[in-house]
Amino acid sequence: MPRVNGRLSTHVLDTHAGRPAVGIAVELYEFADDRAHRVATATTNADGRTDAPLIGGRPLPIGRYELRFAVGDHYRSRGIEQGDPPFLDIVPLRFSIAEPEGHYHVPLLCTPWSYSTYRGS
């Protein structure tokens, strides 16, 4: 049997509040033939993580992906002024997967006015 330990995970840190971001809607899209296909949806928990990997228990399909984080809704729910319309509403992160058996962890660190990411472990 081939190894099936590929995994794609994420978490969100609200650096404005200095804590994990709870309740952020996350969507994962895979690109094929220049079209985006939604492959997973989740919501961040009390630790700012999704309850399960966005892809897991199987080899990761090699390809291009995009995570979309609904940070505007998060800051609205906290009563944080962010402009009308908000400066950041949906934050898209595009990345590629090249290792089917790898662990890709793609976190988002955000405020109402900025964000950053990295490939974590």
Image (cartoon, rainbow, N blue to C red):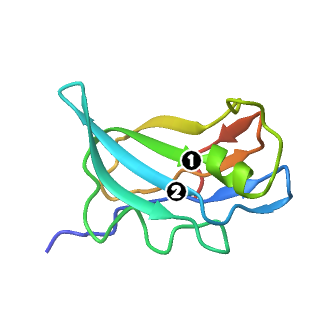
Q: Nearer the viewer, residue 110 or 65?
A: 110
Q: Quadrant of residue 5?
A: bottom left
- Which sits earlier in the primary sequence, circle 1 or circle 2? 2
Q: CA distance from mark 1 to mark 2?
A: 5 Å
> Circle 1 — which element?
strand
Name the mark on residue 70: 1
Residue 74 spot, x, y in % from top left: 67, 54
Give the residue type that dot 1 points to. Answer: Ala
Which quadrant holds the N terminus? bottom left
Residue with the mark numbered 2: 25
Residue 37 spot, x, y in % from top left: 25, 42
Determine the residue located farthest toward the top in the rendered image.
34
Q: Which residue occupies 76% across, 54% down?
A: 14
Local packing at callout 2 (Cα closer than 10 Å; few below 14, some 14-19, many 20+) is some
Q: Which residue occupies 52% across, 68% down?
A: 50
Q: Which residue occupies 80% across, 53% down?
A: 79
Q: Nearer the viewer, residue 25 or 31?
A: 25
Residue 73 spot, x, y in % from top left: 63, 50
Q: Which residue occupies 66% across, 34% down?
A: 88
Give the residue type that dot 2 points to. Answer: Ala
Q: Quadrant of residue 114?
A: top right
State if disc 2 and disc 1 touch (CB < 8 Å): yes
